[in-house]
Image: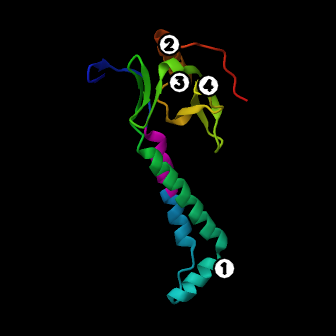
Amino acid sequence: MTNGERTMVVVGRLRAAPLVGWQFACAVLLGVLAARLDWGGDPATAMWNMMFAQPLELMGIAAVLGVWAYMIGLWRRRHDYLRHDGATLYRGASARWPLTLVRGVVVARGNLGLHSVRLVVDDDSEVTRELAKLYMLDDTPEAVRDGVMFAAARVGGRLEAVTVH
C-alpha cells in the first residue's frame, strides 16, 4: 500500500461482521418492541398508553436506538487499516500518532466494559489512546501489538514495560 512517496505497512485490519450482526439484532429487537406497543384508539390515546402505561417498553426502544446509533458510528470505520509509514501510525483516516511517541500497546477494558487495544503514548497525559476494539480486529491482539512495537522500535522510540491500572 502506498501513500504518495511513502510505503505503508499494514499492521492490522478492522472487520465488519460484528457490526452487521449487532445492527441486525437491533433491527429485530426494535421490531419486536414496536409490535408490542399498544397502538389502538386515536393518536392521543395511543401516545398516552405508550408514555404512561408502557414506559419500560418505551425505555427499551430508546436503549435499542442508542445502541444502534453507536453501531452506525462504528460502521464508518469498518474497513480501516492499522498501518504505518515508518514515522507515523495511522488508524484509517481518523487518527494518527508519531511512532517515536509510542511507548507500549496494552489490552484494556473501556468505559462500556468492552476490551480494546490501546496505545501508551508519551504526550504528558495520563490516558491511553484507543487503537481498536478487540471484536473489530481481524488479527489477534498480540499480532497487532507486536507489529506496532516493532515499528516503534525501528523508528527509535523508547520501549518500556507498561502497566495499566
> Mark 4 or mark 2, which has the lower sequence index?
4
Q: Element under label 3?
A: loop
Gap between marks 1 and 3 measured at Cα: 48 Å
Q: Element under label 2?
A: helix
Other residues around mark 1 within 10 Å, as few (<14) / some (14–19) / many (≥20): some
Q: Single out the mark in the foreground, 1 or 2.
A: 2
Gap between marks 4 and 3 measured at Cα: 13 Å
**On the image, numbered disc 4 is attached to which residue?**
106
Residue 155 vs residue 92, the one in the foreground = 155
**On the image, numbered disc 3 is attached to which residue?**
140
Three-letter residue code for mark 1: Ala
Three-letter residue code for mark 2: Phe
Q: Residue lying furthest bottom in this view?
A: 42
Q: Is residue 13 above or below residue 44?
A: above
> Residue 121: percent from the left, percent from the top?
57, 25
Q: Is residue 60 above or below residue 72?
A: below
Q: Quadrant of the C terminus?
A: top right
